[in-house]
């Protein structure tokens, strides 16, 4: 016991000595210490920030009970819709027949699920979601106050009750615990609050988080409960303990196969069972993995750079190390001392890096991942990207690992020296060929890794530039948009809705600075959409389930001009295209090309499923609409998505309660916002407006994720290039200093200054070309992982590869030139006298 205690205290004492000596050494060389700290701190900060994003998205478990057993069940129709919600009848059949699950529940949140909340200081438009009775139970969520829905609530004619979000509880009720039982006036109807959700609850993210949840049976469109072709429900289920996702998927495929044979609306449709976690990370995974690879590359370059510095320092410290060895220091003690120094450097860098990472995480948190589908539950938001214990632990381990990584090889190299020869030579020399070869290899690795990052960034930048050049199909300049949702209780009849729009659009059109005004049900780039089947007069009517699909929007007169779209043929809608007038429709260029490739579609007639099924029955006879115009294609879902077939119905002929008003201004559209709000309130003081924004902002936001990827990777590439330049500059400068005697001899024997310049540059160019060659070969393979993030650019684009490689060679050679020029100015007499 005494021996162990003595060994322990001896170890502590020697460690303290090593730390104390390391501190003195670092303080005595402030330039070397600062360069090393900055280099490592940047790399550690980048790795910590990206790891915090990966932790929030990929590693951290979802905030539900046993989330690994939660799965989503989608309908799928290959070639039509890979992931789609389901209908109410299908959901009830699935729930009654499936045996793989402990429970199965449904929800819905889409563009039309908005309420006008009144009764407070000012009206407010809020998002609501529909939920079946046991949705919250299956997630393992408990209410902060009250209760969740009961089966009797979720039935036709059931109680008009709501569960509210924690944010709404705070915003409208100041966290009053007596909120349970209080009334909430939504669209003019009174609902009773029965529960409050926890503050951290986040589930439906499209179009935004729901502030109010109501029972599924309370949906005003009751006919949805009986029509299998109306797909509007997301379905989540909890697997039984003895069931796997694959087993459940097989069972669901069998059920969907039977339903597709029994019901024509289900023809061609199957099911997909997707783990909730897989759905959440979705399309974020490739981009995150690319960013992880990038920051690891930055860290490797930083380690290479610092290892090169340490190798150079080891040569300068040969005499010091030889003296310590001569007075009894073992090789192991020398290695431990040098490792202590490098680990201490890394830990100090980790502390600085952690401070920098806090700033970087704030930047990352400002860009959250919006869900790309209205039925994709739970997307990670910015407030979930933070420094927790796991991130702190990662930074600590990363710092220690980095210290050992860049310190071990130089320490071993330094401890190998022959102390007697070193003391006899007085420490002169370059540290041996092995030292020089190792430093050369490190520089080659830096150049190769830097080139891979630069090429990747170049591809993303070119892709982003291509995307910005894409014509969206409309002119976003000077366009203001705002959303309006009319309540059914205040506007029960279509004529009431039409009168409101007539009056509002007329008043807005007369505002100073307004050029024209229009309205649409699904604004481009808003992620709102409505798909329906269509039928063309004179052609064979397909059976239900086999009809082709198109994207349907409803627009007011002047909308096409307000959005800056192009009318290719025919006419726009007029004030006469309203209820009671002959049915008309405008189609887009893609629809015209697909259905009438060699004909003029003007005058042809077609019908849309939403109108055909309006009575709940399939009826074409009174729903034929004449095509009166063809407009240019619009990139509705993003600049990187190809336009699909679209049909624009007259809003005044088929009124909708949820629309976006589009105002084209003569100058700055933001100046019109307050005037537009006043005009709405002058018509209806209880009518809120929401999401006031310009089309230019909406277009910019649609590119934010691609821009984020490009900017982050470019920053990493520039940091990597800077480190590589510093590395090769340091290596060349050190080499020139160590070879002063050699250069003096060469010049004494007749070598010209130009010969010395070429000699040094040639050696630098050799390293750069080898590194560039390796980098190009690796990039050819690795950039294929960027394919899903590119638009209009090949992952092996020759122009990007060539230009970036030439740029790297030029920059690195420039860094080599300045120390090489020093060699050219060597005075042979001074050099030989010093030796």
Image (cartoon, rainbow, N blue to C red):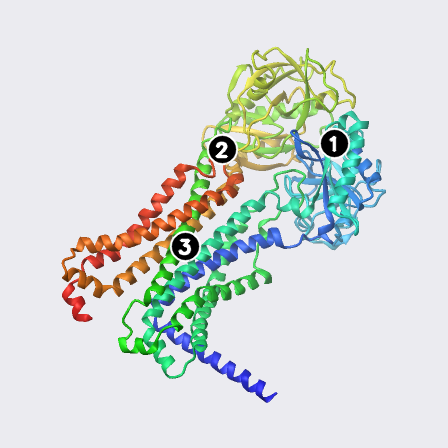
Q: Position of residue 422 (x, y in %)?
A: 31, 75
Secondary element under disc 2, as helix, strand or loop, is helix
Which badge, 1 or 3, comes first in the chain's sequence? 3
Q: Residue at x 30, y 78 (%)?
A: 423
Disc 1 and disc 3: Cα gap in Å? Answer: 70 Å
Vertical placement of residue 383 versus 601, above or below: below
Measure the alpha-carbon separation of dots 2 and 3: 53 Å
Residue 50 image offset from top left, x and y in percent: 52, 53
**Tag 3, which secondary structure?**
helix
Q: Under tag 1, what secondary structure?
A: loop
Residue placed most toward the observer, 718 or 380: 718
- Horizontal side of 298 relative to 219 (left or right) equals left
Q: Which residue is mark 3?
A: 445
The Cα atoms of the two marked residues, 1 and 2, are separated by 32 Å
Instruction: Tell me the quadrant of the picture where the C terminus can be found.
Output: bottom left
Residue 669: mark in rendering: 2
User: Residue 636 placed where, x, y %?
Assistant: 57, 30
Q: Return the residue nearer the eye: 787 or 484.
A: 787
Q: Quadrant of the N terminus?
A: bottom right
Camera-near label (1 vs 3) is: 3
Q: What residue is shown with label 1? A: 489
Q: Residues within 10 Å of mark 3 (few under 14, many from 20)?
A: many
Residue 681 visible at all: no
Give the mark nearest the N terminus, 1 or 2.
Answer: 1
Disc nearest the viewer among 2 and 3: 3
* Mark 1 closeness class: few <14, some 14–19, many ≥20 residues within 10 Å: few
């Amino acid at each position: 016991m005494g021996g162990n205690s003595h060994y322990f205290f001896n170890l502590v004492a020697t460690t303290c000595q090593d730390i104390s000596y390391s501190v003195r050494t670092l303080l005595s060389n402030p330039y070397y210490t600062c360069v090393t700290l900055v280099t490592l701190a940047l790399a550690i900060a980048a790795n910590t920030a990206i790891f915090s994003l990966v932790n929030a998205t990929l590693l951290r478990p979802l905030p539900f009970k046993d989330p690994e057993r939660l799965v989503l069940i989608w309908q799928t129709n290959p070639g039509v819709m890979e992931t789609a919600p389901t209908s109410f009848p299908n959901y009830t059949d699935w729930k009654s027949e499936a045996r793989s699950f402990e429970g199965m529940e449904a929800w819905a949140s889409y563009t039309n699920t908005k309420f006008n909340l009144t009764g407070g200081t000012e009206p407010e438009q809020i998002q609501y979601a529909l939920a079946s009775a046991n949705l919250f139970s299956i997630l393992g969520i408990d209410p902060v106050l009250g209760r969740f829905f009961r089966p009797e609530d979720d039935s036709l004619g059931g109680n008009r009750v709501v569960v509210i979000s924690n944010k709404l509880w705070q915003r409208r009720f100041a966290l009053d615990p007596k909120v349970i039982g209080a009334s909430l006036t939504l669209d003019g109807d009174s609902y009773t609050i029965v529960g409050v959700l926890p503050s951290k609850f986040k589930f439906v993210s499209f179009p935004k988080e729901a502030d109010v949840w109501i029972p599924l049976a309370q949906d005003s469109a009751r006919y949805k409960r009986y029509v299998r072709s109306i797909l509007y429900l997301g379905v989540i289920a909890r697997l039984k303990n003895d069931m796997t996702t694959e087993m459940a998927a097989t069972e669901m495929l069998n059920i969907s196969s039977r339903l597709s044979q029994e019901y024509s609306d289900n023809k061609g449709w199957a099911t997909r069972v997707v783990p909730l976690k897989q759905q959440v990370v979705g399309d974020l995974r490739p981009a995150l993995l690319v960013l992880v690879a990038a920051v690891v590359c930055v860290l490797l370059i930083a380690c290479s750079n610092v290892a090169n510095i340490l190798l150079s320092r080891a040569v300068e410290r040969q005499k010091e190390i030889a003296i310590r060895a001569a007075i009894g220091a073992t090789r192991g003690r020398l290695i431990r001392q040098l490792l202590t120094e490098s680990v201490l450097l890394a830990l100090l860098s980790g502390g600085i890096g952690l401070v920098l990472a806090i700033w970087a995480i704030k930047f990352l948190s400002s860009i959250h991942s919006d869900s790309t589908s209205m039925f994709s539950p739970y997307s990670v938001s910015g407030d979930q990207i933070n420094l927790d214990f796991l991130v702190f632990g990662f930074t600590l381990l990363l710092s220690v690992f980095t210290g050992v990584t860049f310190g071990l090889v130089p320490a071993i190299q330094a401890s190998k020296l022959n102390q007697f020869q070193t003391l006899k030579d007085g420490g002169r020399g370059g540290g041996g060929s092995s030292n020089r070869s190792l430093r050369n290899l490190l520089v080659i690795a830096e150049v190769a890794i830097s080139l891979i990052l630069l090429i990747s960034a170049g591809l993303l930048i070119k892709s982003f530039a291509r995307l910005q050049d894409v014509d969206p199909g409309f002119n976003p300049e000077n366009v203001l948009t705002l959303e309006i949702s009319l309540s059914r209780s205040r506007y029960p009849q279509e004529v009431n809705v039409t009168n409101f729009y007539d009056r509002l659009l007329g008043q807005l059109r007369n505002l100073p600075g307004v050029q024209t005004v229009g309205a649409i049900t699904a604004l481009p780039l808003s992620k709102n959409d409505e798909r329906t089947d269509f039928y063309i007069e004179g052609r064979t009517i397909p059976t239900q389930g086999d009809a082709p699909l198109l994207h349907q929007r409803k627009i007011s007169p002047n909308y096409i001009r307000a959005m800056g779209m192009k009318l290719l043929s025919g006419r726009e809608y007029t004030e006469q295209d309203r209820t009671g007038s002959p049915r008309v429709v405008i189609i887009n260029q893609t629809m015209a090309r697909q259905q009438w490739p060699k004909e003029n579609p003007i005058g042809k007639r077609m019908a849309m499923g939403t109108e055909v099924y309006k009575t709940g029955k399939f009826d074409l006879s009174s729903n034929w609409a004449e095509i009166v115009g063809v407009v240019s294609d619009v990139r509705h879902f993003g600049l990187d998505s190809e336009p699909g077939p679209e049909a624009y119905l007259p809003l005044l002929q088929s009124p909708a309660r949820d629309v976006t008003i589009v105002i084209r201004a003569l100058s700055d559209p933001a100046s019109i916002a307050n005037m537009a709000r006043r005009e709405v309130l002058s018509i209806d003081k209880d009518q809120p407006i929401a999401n006031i924004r310009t089309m230019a902002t909406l277009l910019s936001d649609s590119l934010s994720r691609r821009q984020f990827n490009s900017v982050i990777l470019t920053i990493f590439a520039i940091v990597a290039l800077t480190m590589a330049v510093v590395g090769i500059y340091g290596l060349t400068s050190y080499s020139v200093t160590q070879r002063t005697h050699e250069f003096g001899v060469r010049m004494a024997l007749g070598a010209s200054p130009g010969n010395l310049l070429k000699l040094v540059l040639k050696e630098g160019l050799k390293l750069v070309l080898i590194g560039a060659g390796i980098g190009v070969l690796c990039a050819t393979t690795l950039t294929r992982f960027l394919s899903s993030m590119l638009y209009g650019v090949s992952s092996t684009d020759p122009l990007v590869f060539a230009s970036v490689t030439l740029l790297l060679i030029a920059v690195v050679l420039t860094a080599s030139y300045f120390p090489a020029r020093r060699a050219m100015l060597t005075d042979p007499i001074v050099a030989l006298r010093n030796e």
